[in-house]
Amino acid sequence: MECARIFSCKHEVMAVLDPLKEKEMENHNSLSCWNCKKTIEHVGMNCPHCNVFIDKEMIDRIAAGGITKISSGGLQPGIVFDERYEIIKPLGRGGMGVVYKAHDKYMDRDVALKLIPSELSMDPKAVSDLKRETALALDLTHEHIVRFYNLDTWESYTFVTMEYVQCGTLSHLMVEKGGSLSLNEALPLLTQIGQALDYAHGKNPPVVHLDLKPLNILLTVDGYAKITDFGLARVLRDLATRVSAWEAAGSLAYMAPEQIRGKGIGTWTDVYALAAVAYELLSGHPPFYTGDLRWQIMHEEVDPILDMPEHVNRALLIGLAKESSLRPKTAGEFVKMISNEIPVPDIYGKTASVSQEFSGEADEETGESSVWKEEWFENFVADEGKKPPESAGKPVFVFGIIAFLCLLVLGQLGWILYSQNYINGRIVDRLISVFKPEKQEPGTSDRKILPADHPQSVSVAVTKAEKNTSFKIPIHEEKAVDSPAVGGLSLATTPTGAMVQIDDREQQLSPVVVSDLPEGSHTVKVSKQGFAPWQGKVLVQSSQVLELQIDLSPMSGFISIDSLPAEAAVFIGGNPVGMTPLVLDQETAGELIVELKKEGYETWKKTFDIQPGKEMAINATLTLLPGKLRITSSPKSADVYISGNPVGKTPVALDKISEEKVIVEVRKSCYDSAKKTVAISPGKEAEADFVLKPSCGDLVVKSLPEGAEWFLNGERKGKTPGKAGSLEKGVYKIKVAKEKYADWEVDVTVSPQKNKPVIATLDPIAEMDENLYIDPVTEMEFVWVEKGCFQMGSIPEDPDRSSDESPVHEVCLDGFWIGKYEVTQRQWVKIIGENPSSFQNGLDYPVENISWNDTQIFLSRLNELNQGKASYRLATEAEWEYVCRSGGKSEKYAGGENPDLVSWYKDNSMGATHPVGKKKPNGLGVFDMSGNVFEWVEDVYLADAYLRHKPSNPTYKGEGSYRVCRGGSWLLGSKESRSVNRSYYFTTSRNYNLGFRVVRNP
C-alpha cells in the first residue's frame, strides 16, 4: 500500500469527543509561550511550536520580573552573569547553546561559559542527564582534554563553565590549510586525540565521548589538540533531539553504526569517530557526507583516499569497520596503525588500494568502468521492448529523470500544505498520500511506495501521450508485505498523571502513547483524584495516529480561613490567594496545604483533606516570633548583663527574647561601665553597641643606659625598658637603679589616657680606669689621648705619597677622648632607630652608608640625650692622624708596617666589612684606624690645606663642598689605608665603605 502522511489537530478531536469543552475553548484568553512567544491555548501543556512545557508558575514569575530573560542578542560584554562571571565576548552560537568568553572573578581566570538553551534548562530530564555527565567530566584531568569546571543554574538558566582555549577548532585548521592536512601534519594531532581518548576510556567506569568531531576538538596557542564537551555535547544533542526532533547532521557524519542503532555502544564507538575524523583530516570531507548518511554508515564501505599510502587506507578501513569487534581495541592502537608503527590486519581479505577498488573494464559505449555502471544503474527500457537510443544509458539522461521525479514529489507536498484549511473555526484533519496514484493499465503490478530517502528500489509511473516508460533505480528487491489494520493513539491530559484505560487494557498514567490499536472504535476512561472522571469513544483508523488532549474538570469545595490576629497572608499550595479573613468557594478538592504568614509571627502551616461540595472552616492562632538582640562593645570581651543577669561577653547574640524592652549593662576592667534600655520587636534583630571609656592608664619607663632595674611604689617591676598597664589614676613613685650608676627617682601622675614615657638618664659613679670612659647612652668606649706634638704629613721618600699629603709640618694638640672603635650598627640604632648599613651581618659591625651630614644628626641627638654631661664631635684631621700613628710615631699603618695585622682592606676583607676590634690595636689601644670603613673627620677638604694649618689644634673650615675622610676601607688597597692618606667625598655622599668615629671633649 502507499505510504501516507497524517495531519490532525488534538484540539479538534477533543472538541468532537467532548462537546462540553467547545465553549470553554472559544472563551479562553490566549496565552503566549514564555520561550518562543507564540500563541498557546492554555498552561499545563507542551508548546506546539517549541515543545517546551508551559508552567503557570514560570509564566507568573516572568511577568513579575522574577526571572531575567536574556535578550535575543545574547549576553552583552561587560555584564556580570550569576554575580561571578564577567562576559567578555561571544565565542559561538548553535543549536546546543551559546558559548561566551568570560572572566571568573572568584578564581581570577578566563573561562568558556556555555549557556544551555532554555527549552533544555526547563526539562528536568535534561538537567538530570547533564548532572550525571558532569560528575564523570569533573574527573578528567588530561593535557589534551579541556578541563571542566562547573555545572550550575542561575534563575531559570543552566550553564557550564570550562577551560578557555584560544585558537579555534580542528575545523578552523582544515579551512586554513585549504581543506585537508598532510599525513605528517595530521599524525601529531591524531596521536594527542588518541592519548586523550585512551585516558578517558581507562577510567573506572570508562568515560565515552560519543560526539567526537572536528568542532569538538580545540587547538591551543602552541597547536596542541584538546577534546572538549566530554559527554556533554552528546547529552545536549540527544536532549535536543528528544525535545525538538532536531538532529545535527554534523554529528551524524561521525556516528558509528551501533550508535545509530542505539545499542552496543562503548569505547569502540569513539574509535570509529576518531577514524572518521582522521579520514576528514586527510581527505577534506567525512567518510560519508552526501545522500542518506544513515544508510551509508550502516551498509556501505568507505572509498579509499587517492593520494594516501596503502597502510593508511587499510587503517581507515578497519577503524571504520561496521562490526565493532573488527576495529582496533584502543584509539592508540588505531593511531599506531595509521602511522605504520604496527601492521594493519586484513579483516576483509582484500587490500584497500585504489587500483583494486575501482578496477574494471571500460564500457564499450560510454567508456565508463563497468563495475561502476553495473552496480548503480540499469538501462532505461521502453514498454514496447524497443532498443533505446544510444544516449539513453548516459548519466545525463538519468539525472534528468531524477530531477523530474523530485519536482513531482515537491508538487504533491505543496498541494498537501495548501489543502490544510479551516472549516467553521476548527482544523479539519486530512489524510493525503505522498503520491496520488494514477489509473493503472491492466496487468500493471502493484509495488510498495517507500519514503524518498529509503535505500530500497522504487518504481514511478510516468504517463506520456505517445508511450509509457518506466525508470528504475534498483539496489535491493523486496516483496511488498501487507500491513495489519492497526493505528495509534497519543493521549495527554491536563493535569498529567491521570489514570488512563483503553477498552480492557492495563491502566497507564498519562501521557500515554499506544501504537497497536485495531482499526475501529475504542472506549477511553480517564480518572484522577480531585477531578471529575472522563469517558468517551474514539475512532482509530489504520496507519494513523490519533492525538487526543483531555482537560479534566476539578471538583470544588468551600473553605473559609481566618486568623488571630487578622490580615495574615494566605498561601495554598505555595501560591498566594489573599489575606485573612478569606472565603474560597472554588478550591480544588482533595489534599490541600494551607500556610498563613504575617510579619513578626511564626508561619502557620497545616494540611487539610477537602471534600467535594462540603464547607470547611479554618481558624488559626498565630504565635508571636521571639525577638533577637546583638550586643557589641569597643573594646571587645566586655561582660554583658541583661536585667542584672550575666549572659556572656561581647560580641554576643541572643535569639529568644520575649520582652518588649530589656536593660543591657556592659562592664570591663579599667573601663567605666555602660547601661542602656533596648526596644525589642517580634521577629526582628535589635542591636546595642557600646563604646567604653577607659578608667586606667599605662606607664612606660625607659633608661639611658638600658637594662636598669625599675621600681613602682617600691615594688620591683623588671628591667628597662618596661611597662605597667591598667594603673588607676593617681601619683606613683618611680625609681631606676643600675650598678656603677647613681639611683634615679621621680614622682609621676598617671591619668586614664595615654601617658608620656618616663626616661631616666643615669649618671656613672665609676669608670673602668682613668684612661677609659664609657658613654652612658650608647655604652661607647673612649680612650684618653694625652696632649703632644708631631710631624704631620708624608715624607718625600714615601713612594705612595700624594701631593695633598704635604708639606710635612709640626702640629701640637691638647688632650681629648677618642672612640676606641668605629661607631657600630647597635650604637647607631640606639640613637637614630633605623639601620642604613648595606652589610647587616651583625650589630657589632661598623655602621656604613653614612654621609657627613648624617654624622651631625647622630652627634646632635647623642649630645641632647647626655643632657650636657658630655659633649661629642668628629675628630679633626690632625687629631685623627695623631691617634692613628700611636701619638705621632712614624707608622705607615695604624700600629705597624704590616697592613694584614691591623687593617681590613681589599686583599683580606673578602669583599665585606668585619666586626670592630678583630685586628691588632695601635699603640694607644685604638682599633681599626686603618681599613674596615673610611672615617669622616671635621675638616673641609682642600688640597693645600696643610699650608693653612695653625701650629696648635689646627682644623680647616674654609669654603668647600667636600669633607675629609681618613683610614681607607675594605674596598680599596693598602695604599689608601696608610696613616697619612687623605680622601674626600661630598657631605651628602653615602656608600657602603663610609663610616665614622666619635671624639669626646675633655
Image (cartoon, rainbow, N blue to C red):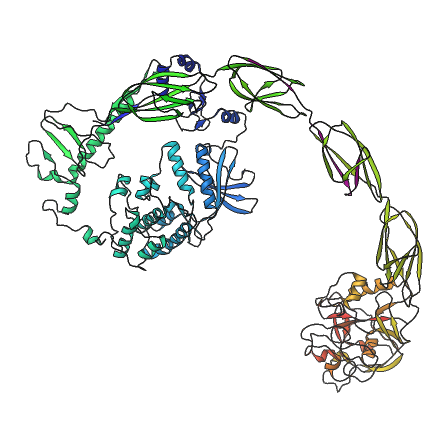
- Look at 38% across and 32% down and name the residue there: 244
In this orientation, does residue 948 appear?
A: no
Q: Is residue 886 left or right of residue 597?
A: right
Asked whether, in this view, residue 536 is left or right of residue 399, the answer is right
Q: Residue 321 or 361: which is nearer the viewer?
A: 321
Where is 955 relative to 463, above or below? Answer: below
Residue drawn at the location 32% of the way across and 52% of the way down: 328
Locate residue 758, reporting x and y percent: 88, 56
Q: Nearer the viewer, residue 600 or 821?
A: 600
Quadrant for residue 425, please give it. Answer: top left
**Does residue 333 appear left or right of residue 450 in this picture?**
right
In the image shown, does 235 or 960 lie closer to the viewer? Answer: 235
Magenta stretch prevailing secondary structure: strand
Find residue 248 and report its image quarter: top left
Residue 946 figure quarter:
bottom right
- Residue 541 image offset from top left, x and y in percent: 27, 21
Which quarter shows the C terminus? bottom right
> Is residue 487 visible from the viewing direction of this image?
yes
Q: Position of residue 289 (x, y in %)?
A: 29, 42
Residue 970 within the magenta-colored segment of the rendering: no
Establish if 843 lies above or below 519: below
> Number of marks in the image?
0
The picture places residue 351, in percent across and down from the top left corner, at 22, 54
The N terminus lies in which quarter of the figure? top left
Residue closest to the far bottom: 797
Q: Residue 21 versus residue 372: which sits nearer the camera?
A: 21
Any magenta on residue 636? yes
For residue 400, side relative to residue 795 (left or right): left
- The answer to whether 312 is drawn above or below residue 648 in the figure is below
From the viewer's perspective, is residue 848 above or below residue 894?
above
The residue at 32%/40% (across/down) is 260
Residue range corresponding to the magenta coloring = 615-641
